[in-house]
Amino acid sequence: MEKPRLLFIDNLRILLITLVAMVHLSISYGGVGSWYYKEGQSDTLTSVLLSWHNGTVQAFSMGLFFLIAGYFTPGSYDRKGPGQFLTDRLLRLGIPMLCFDIVIGPLMAYPLMRLGGWQAGGSYFDFLIRYYGTFHIGTGPLWFVEALLIFAIVYALWRAFVRKTAPVAQSNGRFPGSLAIAALAVALGTVSFIVRIWLPIGWAFEPLNLQFPFFPQYICLFIVGAVAYRQNWLLRIPNATGRFWLLVAVGFVVVLLPALFVAGGALSGDPTPFMGGLHWQCFAYALWEQVAGVAIIIALLVLFRKRLNHQGELARAASASAYTAYIIHGPIVILVALTIRNVALHPLLKFALAVLISVPLCFVLGNVVRKLPLAGRIL
């Protein structure tokens, strides 16, 4: 029997896509990270606050995306079978990824290259020849869609050759205790640190645009999501567990992260030891990132389940266009940033203005795009 729709998960998706757009705008105005458009140097306060924002969001946002994707994967496979499951995944994930790689990506890159003073080598056609000459799969934010496609294929292979029958759902399984959750978070932090000794934050496997330094969390939480579906964990997280991890999250984000950056010398302008290598800062940051990320994820799941498990007309529309909003948010936030680049505002105020314009626009245009001919089946 198909499980009822979890409206609080739909609402969480809206929040997560909003945060992704905010992170990319944050980078534009001085936050740490890599993005297509950056608006010059920012003051110290702006850089610190936006980097704190980005570090916090990175700790949990994409991991929660993968957990949610993992949660809905087993049921989809059970209903459709291997052939239809993979066909749907190829259509829903593969086509948007290729459209972004082939059409949207170069349309974003060309004007930014010209704006930055680089010579594109002549016409747009000449630029395309250069662009496709170094063609990568899963460019820009669509690396996430590419990773989901890979995970779906691996899951289908596992079900086809290892677990040929659907695992039995547990009707009375208990949600893991906080000690087990903490042990998982510490283990994830340790594995992340080991990976980052050789592959620091910012390193990517270029042909596929996959940042392996973050993938221990992504892989683990996708698996946790698949297990959670069988165990019905998302509806069984005790409220007390949510409150406990909310307190942990607040402490880690508000107190521990600033203290770690100060003690580790990040405010002096060199965050490199936090990014990777055999540095205590890298180990401490990896542990902070995973414990904080797990804490925020559990706190949000409980909060949204308890307080936001309902939708009005606006939320339903935003939820329906959430996937499309993610796909198209890149060019939208860049165009908004370029449109207001000459507005004389403090970077923090300009960031806030760009968010207020960009986020609603992503969902509104997402709703328009998904209603185009043939788009409804994919988006």
Image: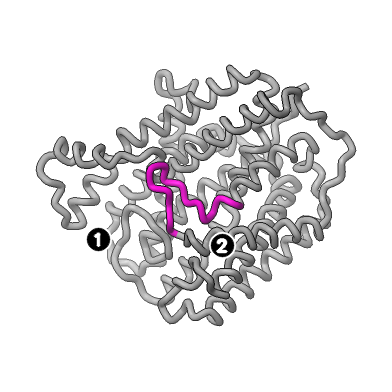
Look at discs 2 and 1 and give the one toward the viewer: 2
Residue 331 at what x, y percent from top left? 34, 44
Residue position marked by numbered label 2 in the rendering:
56
**Amino acid carrying mark 2 in the image:** Thr
Q: Is residue 322 above or below residue 272?
A: above
The N terminus, quarter of image: top right
Question: Residue extending furthest left?
Answer: 122
Q: Secondary structure at mark 2?
A: helix
For this view, does 124 lie left or right of residue 150? left
Percent position of residue 247, x then y: 73, 66
- Would you say the magenta stretch is mainly helix, strand or loop? loop
What residue is rendered at 50% in x and 68% in y? Answer: 277
Camera sees residue 353: no
Task: Say left or right for 280 vs 98.
Answer: right
Q: Which residues are magenta?
A: 202-216
Magenta-drawn stretch contains 39? no
Instruction: Tell me, yes or no, if residue 364 can be seen here.
Output: yes
What number is the disc on residue 342? 1
Q: x%, y% of residue 274?
A: 51, 70
- Left or right: 287 as drawn, with respect to 321: right
The image's colouring method is: one colour
